[in-house]
Amino acid sequence: MKAKDMRELSSEDLIARAATIERDVFKFRLRKVLGQLEKPMVVREARRDYARIKTLLQEREAAKETKS
């Protein structure tokens, strides 16, 4: 998912998506080790999506603090 699309989501949606991606990354890594993962790049893509979400959440938190 692109960062542009993620910016349109609410913080609650981003937090829920981050939790889902975090679980998926674990499952992907496990399947990769067992040799059951067809596309190894999904691990990298999921990690990057997780990092994008965390960055957006930090940006929103920083914006809240500067307004206060």
Image (cartoon, grey):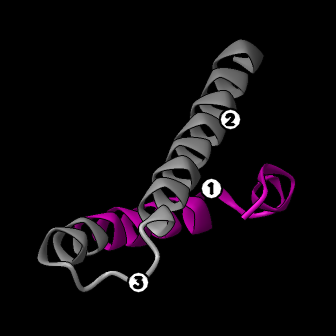
Quadrant of the frame with the C terminus: top right
Q: Earlier in the sequence, mark 1 or mark 2?
A: 1
Does the residue at mark 3 contact the one at mark 1 (Cβ under 8 Å)? Answer: no
Does the residue at mark 1 contact the one at mark 2 (Cβ under 8 Å)? Answer: yes
Specify the segment rendered in magenta.
1-26
Which of the two marks, 3 or 2, is nearer to us in this view? Answer: 3
Whether residue 40 sits left or right of residue 41 in the image: it is left
Question: Gap between marks 3 and 1, in whole Å?
Answer: 32 Å
Q: Amino acid at mark 3?
A: Glu
Look at the image and say whether residue 50 sits in the magenta stretch. no
Q: Is residue 38 above or below residue 55?
A: below
What residue is shown at x 41% (from left), y 67% (from top)? 40
Q: Is residue 39 above or below residue 67?
A: below
User: Residue 47, image x and y in percent?
Assistant: 45, 52
Does the residue at mark 3 contact the one at mark 2 (Cβ under 8 Å)? Answer: no
The residue that disc 1 covers is: 11
User: Residue 30, image x and y in percent?
Assistant: 16, 71
Q: Amino acid at mark 2?
A: Arg
Question: Gap between marks 3 and 2, in whole Å?
Answer: 36 Å
Characterize the local packing of mark 2: few (<14), some (14-19) or many (20 or more) Cα atoms within 10 angstroms.
few
Residue 43 tag number: none
The residue that disc 3 covers is: 38
